Image (cartoon, coloured by chain):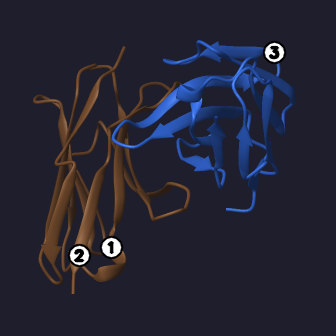
Chain colours: A blue, B brown
Amino acid sequence: DADVTQTPRNRITKTGKRIMLECSQTKGHDRMYWYRQDPGLGLRLIYYSFDVKDINKGEISDGYSVSRQAQAKFSLSLESAIPNQTALYFCATRGTEDTQYFGPGTRLTVL
Amino acid sequence: GENVEQHPSTLSVQEGDSAVIKCTYSDSASNYFPWYKQELGKRPQLIIDIRSNVGEKKDQRIAVTLNKTAKHFSLHITETQPEDSAVYFCAASWGHGNQFYFGTGTSLTVIP
């Protein structure tokens, strides 16, 4: 689904580094989400946003922060990356219907 | 918050057989239950969903059933094909715009 894009697609970094993952969408959706996916644990919600001024913590927000720069952009930051943040990260959007549309994912490795 | 449990974690079936994946949820307020398919290296994609005012929904070879009383819902795939091999996730949500709670996924392998 090219309407939701994520950059970078792959990133290797070192412990203690600050990392930003970016998500952009052209669907015009108000709602945006950040998830992380780990083997055997499914998709877990980190943060979600209903609009530019509305940011909410998900179930695993510790160690992460977000910024909703515009309706179309939602960034996830790891202030000081640690190895257990190695995971596959997905951005998703949701419009007036209930369907979530996922981006292609960012594979992050923290050494 | 909501807790969604999904079983089995892995499932192998012969091509042409049926596959059933089950999920349970804890919050009776949940009213929207989507199923996502994730092929290897790809993003999750919605394959079917059901709302709490409906007991069953079908789309060709795929069906979902919901039992609100027991708080469980199931995905049924009939006449399985090798291209059905993927990881399947169930989820639960309530209210419009609220967060989704995902199950831990089922890795389905269809053996030709």
State left or right for residue B43 relative to residue B3.
right
Residue B96 visible to an observer of this rendering: no
Look at 46% across and 31% down and name the residue there.
Answer: B100
Q: CA distance from mark 3 to mark 2?
A: 46 Å
Q: Residues within 10 Å of mark 1 (few under 14, many from 20)?
A: some
State left or right for residue B48 relative to residue A96.
left
Name the element at disc 1: helix
Task: List x then y, in percent, for residue B22.
Answer: 17, 46
Task: List x then y, in percent, for residue B91.
Answer: 37, 39
Look at 17% across and 30% down and name the residue there.
Answer: B71
Q: Determine whether B112 is above or below B68 in the image.
A: below
The three-letter code of the residue at mark 1 reads: Asp
Q: Which mark is residue B110?
A: 2
Q: Chain of mark 1?
A: B
Residue at image mark 1 = B84
Name the element at disc 3: loop
Q: Which mark is residue B94?
A: none
Look at 74% across and 15% down and name the residue there.
Answer: A54
The three-letter code of the residue at mark 3 reads: Lys
Report the front residue among A76 and B67.
Answer: A76
Residue B43 picture quarter: bottom right
Residue at image mark 3 = A53
The three-letter code of the residue at mark 2 reads: Val
Q: Chain of mark 2?
A: B
State which mark lies toward you, 3 or 2. Answer: 2
Quarter of the image with the C terminus of chain A is top right
Look at 69% across and 25% down and name the residue there.
Answer: A15
Q: Determine whether B97 is above or below A39 in the image.
A: above
Quarter of the image with the N terminus of chain A is bottom right
Q: Chain of mark 3?
A: A
Task: List x then y, in percent, for residue B94.
Answer: 42, 26
